[in-house]
Amino acid sequence: MSTDELIPRAPFVRVVKDISQDVLKDKDALFKLKPDQVRWSKEAIDALKATIEDDLTNVFKQAVKCQLHAKRTTLMPSDMKLYMNIAESQKNFYENVSHDHVKLASARKEIKTKNKKASKDVDSDEETVRTQGGGGAAIQPNQEKNVKNKDANPGNKQGGSIKNPYKADQSGWLPCGECNNLVGGAFKCIRCEKNMHKDCGRIIPESEMRPGEKNGRMCTPCSNESMDLTADE
């Protein structure tokens, strides 16, 4: 049954006005209009008719599904009531799901904010320890560089003893636990046959020598002694 067939049975304009007056009584503060100030244009009433007709068509289609499910040939008010209950349940379900999504997004945002704040606090504490460690004395820039280099090398230990971090097939310079200089190398003195670090002259155990560093040159003490002997002659 279309809207045009419903209008002769119930004056449509009068029904619309009655509904609008009921709504305005409940929402008077929102609309700030009195019931007798409501005016309906022909276009607004036509649009409302089309909307109601679409709603009635949808209700009819869904109610027929309920009727067929009940294996009846007659459409009953119980079919429409069942559809309305189903529609209300679906509406509540989607509203709850949407609300849960909002709560989940809010919780994720709160956790992210807390993690970010905790990370800033940790960085601040580390900066305080780094700059005020050792009785409150600030670390100088060159000292800070050496500290970073020592931290980057897991083989460095206090006391000048280090483990060889290299394998036979790896390349790179041997780090020194004394001067912490990563640019340089180790060599074996051809005179005293001691393994020494190129930059600081620290004696290095045989186990820490890399392949290719066995043959070297004279160390500084041996070189000075050789020069002294040459000068005496």
Image: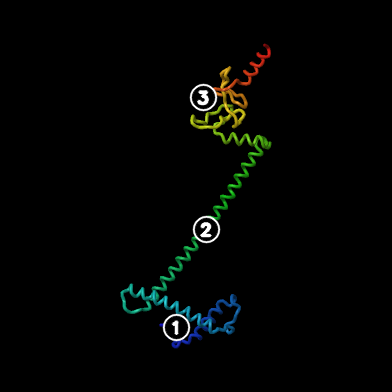
Mark before the other along the chain sequence, 2 or 1: 1
Q: How many marks?
A: 3
Image mark for residue 207: 3
Distance from label 3 to label 1 (Cα)? Answer: 99 Å
Image mark for residue 105: 2
Tell me the crowding category of disc 1: few under 14, some 14 to 19, or many 20 or more residues within 10 angstroms, Cα based: some
Distance from label 2 to label 1 (Cα)? Answer: 44 Å
Corner quadrant of residue 2: bottom left
Relative height, residue 32 to residue 171 (above, below): below
Image mark for residue 3: 1
Assign the N terminus to one quadrant of the image: bottom left
Give the residue type at disc 1: Thr
Disc 1 secondary structure class: helix
Give the residue type at disc 3: Ser
Are the residues flagged by discs 3 and 1 in contact, CB closer than 8 Å?
Answer: no
Q: On the picture, is 221 further left or further right than 172?
A: right
Q: At 47% across and 80% down in the image, what residue appears?
A: 50
Disc 3 secondary structure class: helix
Image mark for residue 116: none
Q: For marks 3 and 1, give the one nearer the viewer.
A: 3
Give the residue type at disc 2: Ala
Q: At 60% across and 24% down in the image, what residue appears?
A: 202
Nearer-the-camera pick, 113 or 199 = 199
Q: Residue furthest top?
A: 233
Nearer-the-camera pick, 193 or 32 = 193
Image coords of residue 28 (percent x, y): 58, 78
Tell me the crowding category of disc 3: few under 14, some 14 to 19, or many 20 or more residues within 10 angstroms, Cα based: few
Nearer-the-camera pick, 183 or 85 = 183
Q: At 50% across and 80% down in the image, what residue appears?
A: 48
Nearer-the-camera pick, 160 or 80 = 160
Corner quadrant of residue 40: bottom right
Image coords of residue 143 (percent x, y): 65, 34
